[in-house]
Image (spheres, rainbow, N blue to C red):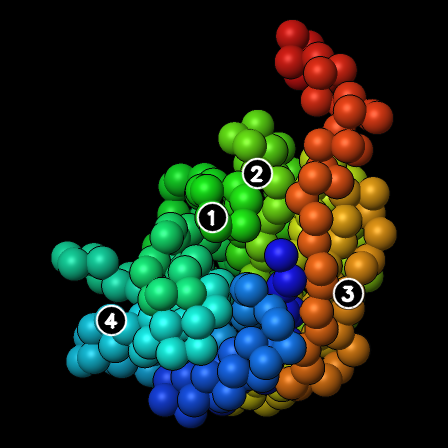
Amino acid sequence: MKVALIQMGVKQGDFEANLKRADELASEAKKHGADIAVFPEMFLCGFDYKRNLEFLKTRGDAAEKGLRAVAEKNRIALCGSLPHLENGEEKPRNRMLFIGNDGTVLTHYDKTHLFKVFNEDRYVKAGDEVAVCDTPFGRAGFAICYDIRFPDLFVKMAKLGAKFVIISAAFPHPRMGHWRVLSKARAIENQYFVIAVNRGGEEDFGKPEGGVKYFGRSAAIDPWGEIIAECPENEADAISYADINLEEVDDIREKIPAFSDRRPDIY
């Protein structure tokens, strides 16, 4: 399979503009032969929680429907996170969707680890389920940003049969070193591919100290921990492509049988 890592800048609170840009980038990815286009965390709106909630309450699932239409129009599978409000709930989920190239939602994952440093837990409802599913390309797992710091989640996805894991993120400076080390570690220790797509550009939260700058550095990492595709640092819009052969997962797990050598009897 060929994956497009779409490192996209985001216009805060502007669902329509971001959806249009996502359509343009998905179209470009399809022209380059990509089977899947992966977008960053909250790529249709950014982190203005008040405006996002107003949109959800007045427009419902319009953004999700628009994204499904983009996938169907461009005949490309899409993955990325956006806010989702369940009926009867006050706080939205940070939901990652995996949409097939016919516009069908194959699965979703609600972010389980909320970033309290930025008060995400005040505005977002945490998910409570691990998501692994069969896709037309292979068995996939899903994670969002802060999740990358919790290795147990990634071990669970490996145990559930994931051959690749998609991470949508909005990692800002100064944590670029953490992003790279953690994404490579998750690939090495679980012996699967990690497709880690981060935001580019800046976001203003109206605070005296200013906003945040996302560093990008999206990457696809193989089960050996080698980077096979990468987007530039600090670029708002960039695409990189990775050709992934999932048979490599079985080969590497056979050479180094780390899973059969685990000691669940003592940890």
Q: Is residue 16 visible?
A: yes
Q: Secondary structure at mark 3?
A: strand
Foreground mark, 1 or 4? 1
Disc 3 residue crowd, few under 14, some 14–19, many 20+, Cα 10 Å: many
What type is the residue that disc 3 sits on? Answer: Ala
Q: Which mark is residue 229?
A: 3
Residue 134 vertical position relative to residue 175 in the rendered view, above or below: above
Give the residue type that dot 4 points to. Answer: Asp
Tell me which label, 1 or 4, sits earlier in the chain.
4
| The image quarter in which residue 237 lies | bottom right
Determine contact: label 3, label 1, CB under 8 Å.
no
Q: Which residue is outermost to the top? A: 265
In the image, residue 190 sits, relative to residue 41, either above or below, namely above
Q: Residue furthest left?
A: 88
Which label's residue is closer to the chain start, 2 or 4? Answer: 4
Q: In terms of secondary structure, where does tag 2 sit?
A: loop
Q: Position of residue 170 (x, y in %)?
A: 59, 69
Residue 162, label in figure: 2
Please name the residue shown 38% across and 51% down the image.
Answer: 107
Label 1 sits on residue: 135
For residue 92, above or below residue 148: below
Point out which mark residue 204 bears: none
